[in-house]
Image (cartoon, rainbow, N blue to C red):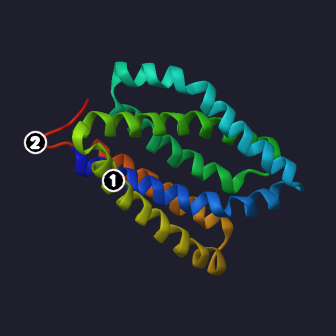
Amino acid sequence: MTYTRFVVSQSLIMMAGSMVFPFYVLLLRNVGNSFSQFGWAYGLFALTSALAYPLIGKISDRFGDKKLLIIYSWSMAILMLCFPIATEVWHVYILQILMGLLGAMQKNAEKTSLARKVERQEAGYEIGKYHVWTSLGAAIAIILTGYLVDFLTIGTIFYVASILYMISGIVLCRTNNETTYNR
């Protein structure tokens, strides 16, 4: 995986995630009926991520960051298609647990990819540059999603996010003779 492909992939992931999460409460409002259910959904996500990090770290060292990022992208693309058809709160809870596991996979692989790439003496600058691109993508996605929700349905953002996750996976799967910086 080249650094450029990594940045493009992670920017697409940030765009997709930023499209869904600020507006996620609207979907929960349609499925559930209380903010405590919203708290449980995010709590299950965070708890699953926390418990999965040590195992994900070992898997990352053994199989490589690129494989984990590809699994994450394609799995999230599939999960996004499930949200609009979730009709019960327990459906959302199961999706959140799966997303917690995948979120740990993405965060760990993202950070280890960056750690393997950057030069120690310029680590802050390199990571700062990386976050400029991923944050710009996220900001643009949040703004545009507000318009999508106004003109279409809440389910539409999950379909668009699914497409972005798929494109991210495609970007990572493509190989050529460019120099790579990690497994």
| Amino acid at the residue labelled 1 | Tyr
Location of mark 2 (residue): 177
Of the numbered discs in the image, which one, if any, rests on residue 34? none
- The residue under the point 54% across, 60% down is 18
**Residue at image x 26%, y 29%?**
183
Image position, residue 70 (x, y; %): 39, 39
Q: Which x, y percent locates residue 178?
A: 12, 44
Between marks 1 and 2 in the image, the one whose residue lies nearer the viewer: 1
Residue at x 39% of width, y 50% of height: 10
Q: Which of marks 1 and 2 is nearer the N terminus?
A: 1
Q: Which residue lies furthest to the right in this view?
A: 33
Query: Mark 1–mark 2 contact, CB under 8 Å?
Result: no
Q: How far apart are marks 1 and 2 (CA)?
A: 23 Å
Can residue 88 be seen in this snapshot? no
- Between residue 96 and residue 88, name the one nearer to us: 96
- Residue 81 at least partly seen: yes
**Left or right: 166 as drawn, with respect to 81:** left
- Where does label 1 land, which residue? 130
Q: Position of residue 14 (x, y in %)?
A: 47, 55
Asked which quadrant contains residue 175, the reply is top left
